[in-house]
Amino acid sequence: MMLEISKILTGHRSIRKFKADDIPAQTVEAVCSEAFAGASSSGNLNTASIIATREPSRRRDLYQMHEQQKMILESPLILTFCADLFRTRKWLARRAARDNFNNLEGFFSGALDAMILAQNVCLGFEARGLGICYLGTTFASMAPLARFFDLPETCLPITTVAIGVPDENPSKRDRLPLKAIFHEEVYRVPSTPELDEIYADREIKAWERYISMPGNKARFEEGGIMNVAQWYTSKYKYPPEQYEAASLAFRHALVEQCFMARKNKV
Ligand SMILES: Cc1cc2nc3c(=O)[nH]c(=O)nc-3n(C[C@H](O)[C@H](O)[C@H](O)COP(=O)(O)O)c2cc1C
């Protein structure tokens, strides 16, 4: 049975616990083929690639590269979405066309293609009752992942999705109110009371959720964390030092994969 799009969207929850059941190859093919057909693509150059990881030993390697997120070991299917300008450039060379796309704009359009495709694939699996969870840890590990997958130049992983039969039924996560993200004609900076209102619900709900996680009460005390905002940039969640390091690694990966010159030239 297929769910209609608004039901899939309003029913969405990330799933982080999976049953061992395999996902039939025909399902994977149908989902990816529909997702690809329905994904807008810059210049219709189709500058994305999907790499499936199923083998348990390779999933264990991925588990290490993704900061030991357990769902990688449980999920029977890990899909890594890449910005891939390599195939296009190889074709250009074959037809004696000028080279291009080995630059930041090439990377950016490939990354957009890959992300649009990834979200379509997620919707396709969710429509079939399967669970998905994105793995943002792809970002910090781009270069090692590129080596792991034997990626050629101008090809880099953008995001990763773990897929499987859900073995949990988490409650739906809140979002900021729509008015916080939707602007008419020009950007409107919220006043301080409006900002407080936008985050009011989040401050309560996320606090309750995070404080009830095992070990977090002690962490909040130890780190002197008084609110959810402080939790977000504490050493336990998204520490700025880690973001700086990942940003440097990202730059290094862009250079290594020939999206960016070592110096000066973009
Ligand atoms: C780009 C991206 C990266 C994410 N990375 C992770 C991750 O590494 N680990 C994880 O458990 N969830 C990850 N998520 C899932 C988010 O935590 C989740 O979407 C968010 O908390 C909202 O919850 P919901 O998807 O259940 O509505 C990621 C989501 C996105 C879009």
Image (cartoon, rainbow, N blue to C red):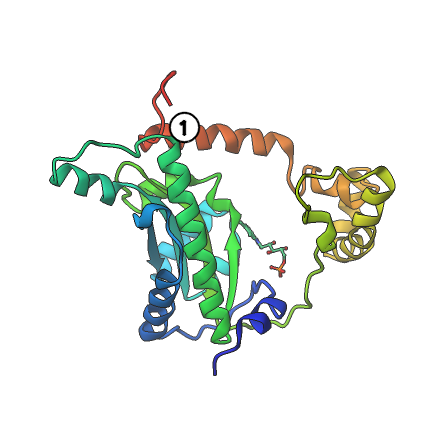
Q: How many numbered marks are there?
A: 1
Q: Which residue type carries mark 1?
A: His
Secondary element at image label 1: helix
List the single residue furthest toward the bottom. Answer: 1
Q: Residue furthest top?
A: 264
Q: Image check: 182 left or right of 110?
A: right
Location of ligand 1 given as a quarter of the image = bottom right
Q: Looking at the rendering, which quadrant does residue 169 occupy? A: bottom right
Frontmost residue, 167 versus 86: 86
| Image height of 180 relative to 230, above or below | below
Say whether residue 176 is visible: no
> Residue at 44% of width from left, 56% of height from top?
118
Q: Which quadrant would residue 24 be assigned to in this image?
A: bottom left
For disc 1, the marked residue is: 252
- At horizontal 49% and vertical 66% (from top left) the residue drawn is 123
Give the residue at x 35% y 60%: 36
> Where residue 181 sits in the image (x, y, percent)?
68, 48
Residue 144 visible (yes or no): yes
